[in-house]
């Protein structure tokens, strides 16, 4: 059954705040900031979106090493020499949406697969045996195959074994998010993909995902339902002006932090990778530009989490994570069933850093960082909590094998 | 000079408590614990994972220190109480650092929820050490419901800004009948010494040691600073005068 979605975004939401923010001035600064603007942005204590604009500018590119030093220091002070590790768990690559950049897009003739809740639990056991305690459930958009009930069943199946479950699927209404929270889901990840409406329309050709506003309001709905953490993201390579995307993403994160002050907010900006469908990024963001983005975000949003995924190469991740990254995926498979039974379905994209989780953890240790596998108290469940999940969240002093 | 810190009937030889976040490795944590001489170490329950190959508790020797589990991550009284009960059910000591920080950016404590949770946990027999804003009345309320200490913040967690709440801390120390542990914001040994000179019972330090280039050496530096500050407090610091006060007074020759 098709459900009607309201147009626009609710008043009093972070989405509404973002839409009412005039970013054009900041975009101007991001293109044309003077060295004096950059100086001011670097030397100030609390940075505004105008400062972020200056830090993203070509003028700031000349100050990259200085920015990196400040970003590193700010990160260590706020988060310590630690990086949280997580793994994506792909539930299904079925999809009715047609999105130009995604391997799962409806038109692509690929091997499709949807895991049963038992298969999902088997994947989770494999991930926990590799050390993971933070798992992100990912699925294509198919309201019948990847239904609300299916997702609730999957979360419930995992909750006894996985202390931290987050979700990245099609977006839902508040009621569905509340069901997912009560089943044991603590985090919501929503990529707006691009904040530019025209680019969004051109990239999303078919399916409910075409509704920009409904998607933009999803983190608000998740937060209202009790999600403890929110992550928002944009794909670099859709809109030609990456500076504009970073500004909008930062403004969204800031608005979410203000509106949903109890939620942890994180951002993610993957550079698009090759996938089925032969999409070509509009303009590749260079490594140097990408590092500038990481540094600028860390300096402008000192308390916001930043994710760096396996879309980036091992060499790049090993060098760049120090500039503000707080969590990384590792040993990722982007096809359903990929941990127990790899290669049976089409991946969403090719991962670039193909090292195992243990290898990524070892590289972090070598760099003097502590890879953190578990850092959670579980979902914000207000009713009775399943005993098994609680028991597993904090094992006893004696339970060490 | 005997000067042990006594909390809930237990003596501590060190007035430096250590947090365990932000360390680059368990080895670094362990070395800092030894060098700092601390006898009380707080660990977030959310970080503990005894089923993992490596766990944060590997760096904490229960023979040497009292493990003070904390409720970090809880955003209301209900969650904090749930976590404390889980800790007890898991066989950990029933000493709880009560942290209720609903706002994840500055991690500021929620006084309303903290008082609610403290009342429940004290009644259930926990030894409760609550992390609070430097609010003198709240500290008295927490003392009234049976908390073993109060732990007001010097400044925001991890900010290294020192004793920005000094004026309120002075009132809390003056009024308190339980040890006052200055927690959060202490970024340098000199700031720890300052808190001890004011008469704090102890200080809790984490970021400054955990993120130092050499955490063990910084732990040692804090150990000395805390001892120096305490000794100065015990010795009776001279008052600060507005004008010069000659050590050999000009009128000393006059018969009194």
Image: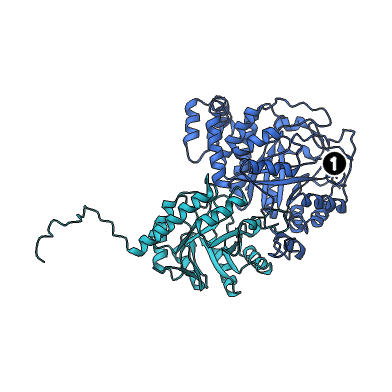
Chain colours: A blue, B cyan
The answer to whether residue B103 of the structure is visible from this angle is no
Report the front residue among B151 and A198: B151
A388 with respect to B217 (left or right): right
The answer to whether residue A307 of the structure is visible from this angle is yes
Question: What is the quadrant of residue A105 in the picture?
Answer: top right
**Secondary structure under badge 1?**
loop
Residue B229: where, in percent of width, then height? 39, 58
Residue at 69% x, 43% y is: A362
Can you say whether A88 is above or below A283 in the image? below
Can you say whether B155 is above or below A241 in the image? below
Classify the position of the C terminus of chain A by image quarter. bottom right
Give the number of marks. 1
Can you say whether A353 is above or below A171 in the image? above
Question: What is the quadrant of residue B96 in the picture?
Answer: bottom right
B145 with respect to B52 (left or right): left
Report the front residue among A365 and A35: A365
A151 with respect to A227 (left or right): right
Q: Name the residue under label 1.
A: A93
Residue B181: where, in percent of width, then height? 47, 62
Identify the subunit bearing mark 1.
A
Residue at 41% x, 51% y is: B190
Residue B58: where, in percent of width, then height? 65, 57
Badge 1 crowding class, 10 Å Cα cut-off, few under 14, some 14 to 19, many 20 or more, is many
């Amino acid at each position: 059954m098709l459900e009607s979605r309201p147009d626009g975004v609710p008043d009093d939401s972070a989405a509404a705040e973002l839409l009412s923010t005039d970013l054009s001035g900041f975009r101007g600064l991001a293109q044309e900031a003077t060295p004096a603007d950059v100086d001011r942005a670097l030397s100030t204590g609390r940075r505004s979106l105008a400062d972020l604009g200056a830090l993203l500018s070509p003028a700031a590119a000349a100050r990259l090493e200085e920015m990196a030093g400040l970003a590193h220091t700010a990160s260590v002070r706020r988060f310590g020499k630690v990086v949280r590790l997580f793994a994506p768990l792909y539930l299904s690559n079925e999809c009715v949406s047609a999105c130009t950049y995604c391997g799962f897009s409806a038109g692509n003739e690929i091997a499709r697969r949807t895991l049963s809740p038992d298969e999902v639990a088997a994947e989770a056991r494999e991930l926990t045996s590799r050390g993971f305690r933070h798992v992100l459930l990912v699925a294509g958009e198919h309201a019948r195959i990847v239904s609300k009930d299916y997702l609730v069943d999957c979360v419930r199946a995992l909750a006894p074994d996985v202390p931290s479950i987050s979700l990245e699927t099609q977006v839902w209404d508040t009621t569905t998010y509340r069901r997912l929270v009560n089943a044991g889901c603590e985090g919501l990840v929503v990529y707006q993909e691009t904040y530019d409406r025209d680019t969004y329309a051109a990239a999303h050709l078919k399916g409910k995902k075409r509704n920009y506003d409904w998607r933009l309001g999803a983190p608000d709905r998740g937060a209202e339902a009790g999600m403890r953490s929110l992550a928002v993201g944009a794909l670099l390579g859709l809109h030609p002006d990456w500076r504009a995307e970073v500004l909008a993403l930062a403004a969204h994160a800031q608005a979410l932090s203000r509106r949903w002050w109890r939620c942890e907010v994180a951002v993610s900006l993957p550079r698009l990778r090759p996938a089925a469908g032969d999409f070509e990024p509009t303009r590749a963001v260079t490594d140097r530009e990408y590092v500038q983005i990481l540094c600028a975000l860390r300096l402008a949003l000192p308390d916001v989490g930043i994710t760096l995924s396996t879309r980036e190469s091992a060499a790049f991740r090993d060098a760049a994570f120090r500039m503000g990254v707080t969590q990384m995926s590792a040993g990722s498979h982007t096809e359903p069933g990929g941990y127990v039974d790899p290669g049976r379905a089409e991946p969403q994209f090719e991962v670039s850093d193909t090292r195992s989780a243990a290898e990524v953890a070892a590289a972090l240790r070598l760099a003097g960082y502590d890879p953190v596998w578990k850092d959670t108290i579980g979902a914000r469940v207000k009713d009775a909590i399943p005993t098994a999940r609680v028991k597993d969240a904090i094992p006893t002093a004696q339970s060490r094998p | 000079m005997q000067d042990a810190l006594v909390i809930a009937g237990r003596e501590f030889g060190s007035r430096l408590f250590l947090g365990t976040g932000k360390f680059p490795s368990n080895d670094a944590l362990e070395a800092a614990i030894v060098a700092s001489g601390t006898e009380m170490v707080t660990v977030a329950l959310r970080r503990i994972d005894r089923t993992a190959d490596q766990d944060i508790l590997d760096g904490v020797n229960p023979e040497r220190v009292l493990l003070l589990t904390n409720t970090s991550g809880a955003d209301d009284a209900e969650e904090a109480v749930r976590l404390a009960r889980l800790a007890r059910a898991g066989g950990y000591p029933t000493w709880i650092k009560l942290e209720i920080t609903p706002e994840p950016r500055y991690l500021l404590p929620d006084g309303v929820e903290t008082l609610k949770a403290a009342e429940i946990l004290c009644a259930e027999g926990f030894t409760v050490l609550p992390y609070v804003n430097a609010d003198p009345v709240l500290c008295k309320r927490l003392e009234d419901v049976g908390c073993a200490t109060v732990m007001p913040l010097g400044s925001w967690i991890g900010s290294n800004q020192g004793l920005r709440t000094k004026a309120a801390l002075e009132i809390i120390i003056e009024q308190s009948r339980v040890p006052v542990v200055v927690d959060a914001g202490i970024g340098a040994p000199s700031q720890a010494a300052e808190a001890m000179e004011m008469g704090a019972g102890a200080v809790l330090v984490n970021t400054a040691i955990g993120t130092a280039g050499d955490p063990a050496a910084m732990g040692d530096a804090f150990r000395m600073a805390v001892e120096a500050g305490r000794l100065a407090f015990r010795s009776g610091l001279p008052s600060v005068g507005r004008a010069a006060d000659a050590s050999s007074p000009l009128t000393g020759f006059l018969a009194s």
